[in-house]
Amino acid sequence: MKKVLLFLVMSAMFSLFYSCSDDENDNDVNNEVITPATYSFVRDGNSTVSYSGQTTRIEMAQELEGVLKDTSKSEEDLDGMFTNTGNKFSDASLNESTKNVRKKVAASKDFFSENATDGTAIKGDFDSWIAAQVNEVFNNWDNDASVGVPGKIQESGGGSTRYINSKGLEYNQAIIKSLIGGLMVDQILNNYLSPAVLDEATNRTDNDAGTLYVDSSGNVKDYTLMEHKWDEAFGYLYGLDNATAPELNKDKYLNKYLSRVEGDADFTGIADDIYNAFKLGRAAIVAKNYEVRDAQANILKEKISEIIGIRAVYYLQQGKNALSPNVQDSFHDLSEGFGFVYSLQFTRKPNSNEPYFTKSEVDGFISILSAGNGFWDISEDALETMSNTIASKFNFTVLQAGS
Amino acid sequence: MLKKISIILVAVSIIYACTSSEGEDTTSADNFDRGAMLINIADNIIIPAHQDFTNKLAALKGAGVNFTENPNQSNLDALRTSWYNAYKNWQHIEIFDIGKAEELQYKFFMNIYPLTVADVESNISSGNYDLNSSNNHDAQGFPALDYLLYGVADSDAEILAKYTTDLNSSNYKKYITDVLNQMDTKTQEVVSSWSSYRSEFVASTSNTATSAVNKIVNDFIFYYEKGLRANKVGIPAGIFSDNKLPEKVEAFYRKDISKELTLEALNSVIDYFNGKSYGSSTSRTGFSDYLLYLERQDLNESIVNQFNEAKIKINSLNNNFFNQVDDNNTEMIRAYDELQKAVVLLKVDMLQAFSINIDYVDGDGDG
């Protein structure tokens, strides 16, 4: 009997130990692949790391973010930045680029290549939010908002003025926070880290043979296509950051919110976990060790999905705490929460083909947040239930995320 | 046996490491007479301070009536004087954000600055406004009067013209009246609530998130950190922004009393900490005594000394904080640093000694 008890204690200990440190395995040495000190890879003296297309798209998203509250802009101006048409960017090189943001929203191979229905519907959500920002919010910029009436509203105690729709939602926050999922997370987790993309066509044999990528103009690149795909995943997180020594908070999107989660003492270390997994996975491709590569992709799926889950719960909790006595004090947090909740459909459970929450589950959350008069009359219970539902699928508690 | 113990120790330490962020239990570990402390704070500090403030506000309101009925230089001077007296007195009130004051969000109607002048002017020109709307928290109270009595025009003659010959003079006068009535109404509600709230307050001695002891200790630290350190000194000095913001000082339009108001606020903090009766030199049970009871003379001394250091530093500044920040912000930042040193002592060490959890979080500063 005692031995059984001891065994139970030990297995409980093991599971505790495991849950405390499951992010610490195989970062150092694994099948002879060693985690390099930095995300820096060379072949014949030339860097093989390239993700300029991702940097460009983040820069486009940054410019869009900067004008979402600029009432001198028209719907056409904002759409022009979303789709890169009409030379709407202040940075001429962005206007000249062949890239655009919209095309890569809800456009991952794993989730949307055979589901254009959802992909198109999601792109349509962004289109409609942009249109509504101009038609509902810009057009009522100087009017006082109230229940069912769009306009401006000031937080209590001389706080910030928020510009909201008839339900209390700041469309600009919905757009920015939903893009974190719809663009960055979807492209990283469901596209570039997917074996369907990494191993597409002859990528694996080419990588095994060290065959370098030849682009459509016939230029021989310094990298194999598989290396490049991994870099493109990396670029959606670190595209405006320092690749060899990430500083974080270098954009208004995923890089910023990794920094925020890292800053919460309950999650400190996540930034290193993510950077290490990117480095080791890339080194594994160089070493032609695809098991290690895919193990790192799984770590990234878990950790990057967590950023979205944690921030969704964080803002729902902040909003819940601010509902009373001045309901308008909750609108900004709930608007950010709305976007992070929307982004949940782009997360990815490790070792699976599933997001943590499906599109229809997310649509359910969004309809709760938008029901009736929206944030004006949402209940604490509804926000608490939603927080618990979200946290229950992740490896964190509402308490940890909410503070 | 030894092995088993070590296994348990390891397990416990792992569990601890996994759950250390989940907070502590809420029972009070000591036998300090918290009730006596609350009685002293209610009867000798809060209630007399509010009573005095009521008198000052009645004088202010009376001067407002005289001025709006007869806007001349001598009535303007009298109104300014009573505004100044009441504003100084307010520095003893804002810290008590509990009971009715908390429920009404009393301070939001009294002293939110910087003022949004555009809102004040548009309210006056339209004549159509709701001072209970949060849109107008920064368009009323002492800061609105500061503007209306000192900043609405460049000279006294031009200021008086706003209330006499200006096309909108009746709306200007009405705004003064409405702001004063609003301050008076809210104050009456808070002051009268104490006659019934007192018994609930003094009996609320447990160590829970909603007990009076925990709330006033938290409110004390919050006021010191936000109302005093940040609003009066840190924000104008640019501690929380890329540039210094001298236009955010308290009493910006009157200009020369920002230091005095800050010192008054710091004195009220010090007196409250020591349990000193309002308007007298008698000291009874306060936070200081609680620390001494817990044999934390060291911490008590550090806090008292740090308050004094901050006071000395603030005293050395220009009477006009706008000028101080504008001319020599380094000294303003030094004063901030001295105030900040006490935040750590209060928010970490004192709360730990009292076994009280912090009940507010700093915003994440997200735009």
Image: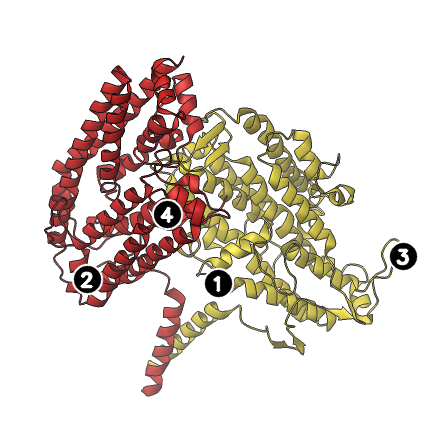
Q: Nearer the viewer, mark 2 or mark 1?
A: 2
- A240 in relation to B235, above or below: below
Whether residue B203 is visible, yes or no, is no
Disc ID at residue A268? 1
Q: Give the quarter of the image for residue B309.
A: bottom left
Residue in the foreground of this view, choosing between A347 and A60: A60
Describe residue A61's horizontal placement relative to residue A364 as left or right: right
Amino acid type at image mark 3: Gly
Labels in figure, total: 4
> In the displayed structure, does residue A314 sit left or right of residue A233?
left
Q: Which residue is mark 3?
A: A218
Going by the numbered disc 4, the residue's amino acid type is Val
* Label 2 sits on residue: B291
Q: Is residue A117 above or below residue A249?
A: above
Letter of the chain in red: B
The answer to whether residue A337 is visible is yes
| Crowdedness near tag 4: few (<14), some (14–19) or many (≥20) residues, C-alpha within 10 Å | many
Check disc 4 and report its element: helix, strand or loop: helix
Q: Mark 2: which amino acid?
A: Leu
